Amino acid sequence: MPKVVVIGAGIVGTSLADELTARGWTDVTLVDRGPLFATGGSTSHAPGLVFQTNPSKTMTAFARYTVEKFSALQHPDGWAFNPVGGLEVATTAERLADLHRKVGWAQSWGIDGHLLSPAECAALHPLIDTDRILGGFHTPADGLAKALRAAEAQARRAEARGATLRPHTEVLGVLDNGRRVTGVRTADGVLEADVVVCAAGFWGAQFARQVGLVLPLVPMAHQYARTGQIAELVGRNTERTEAGLPILRHQDQDLYFREHVDRLGIGSYSHRPMPVDMTHLLADTAGEPMPSMMPFTEEDFAPAWRAAAELLPALGDAKVEEAFNGIFSFTPDGFSLMGEHRELPGFWVAEAVWVTHSAGVAKATAEWIIDGTPSIDTHECDLYRFEDAARSPEFVLQTSTQAFVEVYDVIHPHQHRTALRGLRTSPFHHRHTELGAYFFEGGGWERPAWFESNSTLAQRLFDDGLAVPDRDEWAGRFWSPISVAEAHWTRQSVAMYDMTPLTRYEVCGPGAASFLQRMTTNNVDKSVGSVTYTLLLDDAGGIRSDLTVARLGPDTFQVGANSPMDLDWLSRHKPSDVMLRDITGGTCCLGVWGPKAREVLAPLCPDDLSHGAFGYFRARHTHLGAIPVTMMRVSYVGELGWEIYASAEYGAALWDLVAESGAPHDIIPAGRIAFNSLRIEKGYRSWGTDMTAEHRPAAAGLDFAVRFGKDTDFVGKEALQTAAAPATTLRSIVFDDPDAAVLGKEPVSLGGTCVGYITSAGHSATIGRTIAYAWLPSHVAVGDVVTVAYRGATHAARVHAEPVVDPEMTRIKR
Ligand code: FAD
Ligand code: THG
């Protein structure tokens, strides 16, 4: 049986010991530098509020599992979970509207939650001043976790199954044999291990550095205060129940509240960000009871106290009785860090995890370690989701600080960060700026969303009858009607798209073909010049990514991919006779698409670009003017045209060359919003949004990219062959009301019952309506009417056959 050492006996480490031993891996040693179970880590003083609803389906599922698990734990001192319910109040119209959106997430992910009037809120929580609020979001199953009891109950259960608990033992180093982990070194000697899991809380980043691993997390101080006795609370609770009122969030003032018998606990995020410098930590906490506690800085709390007393007038005469600045981890995107060190197999991390998500993260980690694949999609938490630049100390600090500041803010789904912009720009960037591009950020790249230079064309098209949806303020944010004109013009004439940020790899060497055959579902071992759309699956048959594989030579392939996780996955499986290289940086890509694309490009190219000579899904090296390029006849927007790749130094000239040749054909630059709406019209999925490892190809409508009959077995094949028919499938729906817009994650109902959720959506210029993807029960038929809840409104939509636009492929294959 494999030996496991778990570093850290906080809520994550103890939960993991429980999950591992429950699966029969009982040779687990749980090590902590501190005493058990108030080790001195973040868990020791976490007030334990568990609000389950989260924009992320996965994080919500982690929280729900934590609630279920903790509810069933037994501890001699009493409850480990107290389901007092959760209440989030709104004091602004924008927050109230956002609570509607939260109701939507709750429905989409299966959490019971609804909106309440101010009076109903006060009935649940009588300390609230009803005049201060506009309403609230109530979730009856949320509540309080007693983190230390939950930690102890889980650790004791693990111990009963054979695990060893080792308090007062600091892990000083990790041992390996040059290939994988062999154990850890502690002050008391070596503990042998096949698997070491770093669950060291906010110390994890510092610890993991010794094995060459960057954990993008920042320890931050966060204020928590307990009041003295509050008259209104006296007699409400016993020492045993502790609390009866719902846990409360006042997010407009960055505050949360819970009861401690007849006192109130107040947590505040309203203060300046306080990143903790680990090198000074011990000195900074000297005199405090625990190393994760810093002295309370009263001046930071004063505004929070005033805001708290406004919402809860009962605080009027009360005072802060005890308070501290507690430390826990923040990450650039707010998600946890999970996975195995690629260069040191056997070294795992489960870091930056709230009590709220702890049991869910532990379960997924145990499954990942033991079965090889977690039963839930973890891509948002994947250790290897970060671009290189995003792992720099500068980036991690700035974005994690922003995550702290924004922790309770209303965040628009298309809102992009403002710090550290302009990190990655394509060679077309100068022109984009001149053309009035409005930029989105993605993967560090500046990506044009639309171009103001198209406003005259847009106006002309609108005057001629092109319909523009009347979007509300929310759906109209980070959006422009110009994007509708750009999409229309792509189908009508021709447009150029910056595809430089599209992740691409070169895969070469004698083993390249067989490697890609084994890693992906489609047959990629075709003639030089072929391009193949194919899928990366995990061992359970879940979709890890979708790729294009272009064979540029017998042993040379170019792979179009989705995220840094693809490089990670391929690297882990790569044999030594294959070279794998990310060539995204240093190259550029221009998409030229539309019915006139051939007329624009043919005069520049010595090769014959006719359909007969350069077919669909073919690639070749050639020249445009004097510029060496690789052209691929691929179009994510579903039009005639090419992706044109060049070395970056040619990029600026390439843009101008195509723009000039296109001028007589009225070529335009077009942005991401048009791009997105066109690919949705065409039925093309976007990995990470429309589908994830949670879904198999059949469910996502991608069976056509799986070749069971090819010579080679491929990763995930066996799992697909034994899989039952999918219960839910990805469908296209079209909204009735031309002005209806949705932005993603909204719940979809059939006959009044929520049966699914939206993934992505876009206004289709071609049919003048919003088209969205939704996960729906497989029995749903084309023509069925569904309703979608959008921030308090209800929109009717119809399930449509796919693709909505050009099912015969006549636009592309000509
Ligand atoms: P920890 O509890 O810190 O455990 C890590 C352990 O690793 C420690 O015991 C440490 O001693 C040990 N360790 C580290 N290095 C070594 C080593 N080299 N050798 C041996 N042992 C080592 N979360 C919520 O969900 N809801 C809340 O309401 C909430 N409120 C919070 C309020 C405050 C004031 C704070 C500070 C945090 C709050 N959190 C809350 C966050 C939550 O407390 C943490 O995210 C969570 O407890 C982290 O658990 P952990 O097991 O990862 O880390
Ligand atoms: N271009 C390139 N690589 C990519 C993308 C791209 N890799 C990642 C991502 N985008 C992959 N997604 C798609 C989705 C659909 C198609 C291409 C890439 C596509 N599908 C055709 C269809 O379904 O009709 C394929 C048909 C076939 O298999 O022949 O074109 O944008 N380079």
Image (tube, rainbow, N blue to C red):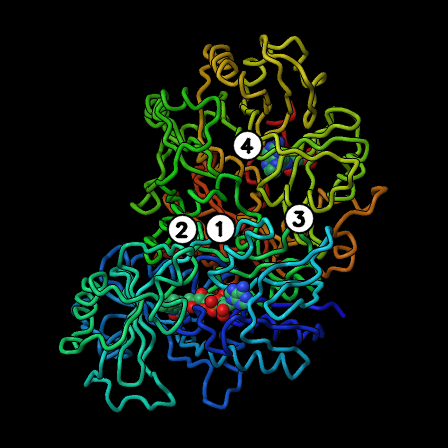
Indicate the secondary structure of the residue bearing disc 2: helix
In front here: 525 or 611?
A: 525
Mark-to-mark CA distance, 4 and 1:
35 Å
What residue appears at the point 62 percent right and 14 percent down from the top-left corner? 628
What crowding class fits label 3: few (fewer than 14 Cα within 10 Å), some (14-19), or many (20 or more)?
A: some
Q: Quadrant of ligand 2?
A: top right
For badge 4, the amino acid type reads Val
Mark-to-mark CA distance, 2 and 4:
35 Å
Indicate the secondary structure of the residue bearing disc 1: loop
- According to the picture, the residue beneath numbered tag 3 turns out to be 343
Q: Which mark is residue 216?
A: 1
Left or right: where 110 falls relative to 51 = right
Location of residue 170 with respect to 811 vertically, above or below: below
Label located before the other in sequence (1 or 2): 1
**Residue 724 position within the rendered picture, expressed as x and y whole percent measured from the top left:** 72, 61
Mark-to-mark CA distance, 2 and 3:
25 Å
For badge 2, the amino acid type reads Ser
**Residue 119 position within the rendered picture, expressed as x and y whole percent measured from the top left:** 22, 74
Q: Quadrant of residue 650?
A: top right
Location of residue 316 with respect to 60 vertically, above or below: below
The quadrant in which the N terminus is found is bottom right
Label located before the other in sequence (1 or 3): 1
- Mark 4 near ligand 2 (CB under 8 Å)? no
1 and 2 marks in contact (CB < 8 Å): yes
Q: In this view of the protein, can residue 114 be seen by the observer?
A: no
For badge 3, the amino acid type reads Glu
Indicate the secondary structure of the residue bearing disc 3: loop
Residue lying farthest to the front in this orientation: 188
- According to the picture, the residue beneath numbered tag 2 turns out to be 400
- According to the picture, the residue beneath numbered tag 4 turns out to be 637
